[in-house]
Amino acid sequence: MSDTTHDQPLTASELITRRVASLADWRGPTLARMRALILDAVPDVSEEWKWRGTPVWSRHGIICTGETYREVVKLTFARGAAMTDPAGLFNASLEGNTRRAIDLREGEVVDEDAFRALVREAAALNAARPRKG
């Protein structure tokens, strides 16, 4: 997968769209659905492409990443340990002091309202963080 089109570098959003399209099984539609929920929850979120091909959504810092593995689509929230998660969506990376993740397996459905609330909370935590400088 080339990172350019007609000698112009692709944007992060274009690279994420390509990643979704390249996933021919259940992971493509799952990542696309979660991406749509993120964009809906925080309309001014920035899409980024980091660490050799990881979709990242940021606003005043990283909200979450969207990684795909053979068995799961993993959404890792950078400051998840500081979040409330009243619906109990976090089901992975629970032992750390900073991150928390949601692992989605084939056929699993996430509570969309609870997920959007988590994304909004992550963005609010980032915005409330004191700025350096």
Image (cartoon, grey):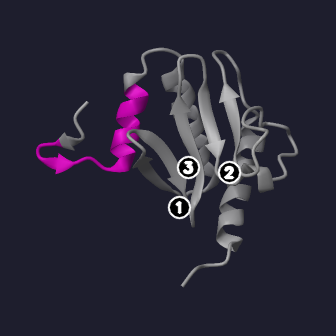
Q: Which residues are magenta?
A: 5-21
Q: Which mark is residue 119?
A: 2
Earlier in the chain: of badge 3 and badge 2, it is: 3
Identify the residue shown where x is 38% and y is 26%: 21
- Give the side of residue 80 with respect to residue 27, left or right: right
Image: 86 above or below 124: above
Identify the residue shown where x is 53% and y is 51%: 57
Q: Amino acid at mark 1?
A: Asp
SS type, badge 3: helix
Pick the front one: 43 or 53 = 53
Estimate how packed mark 2 is, as few (under 14), some (14 to 19) or many (20 or more) residues with alpha carbons within 10 Å.
many
Rendering coords of residue 118 (x, y %) = 74, 49
The reply to whether the magenta stretch includes residue 118 is no
Q: Point out the image quarter for the C terminus.
A: bottom right
Earlier in the chain: of badge 1 and badge 3, it is: 3
Image: 41 above or below 20: below
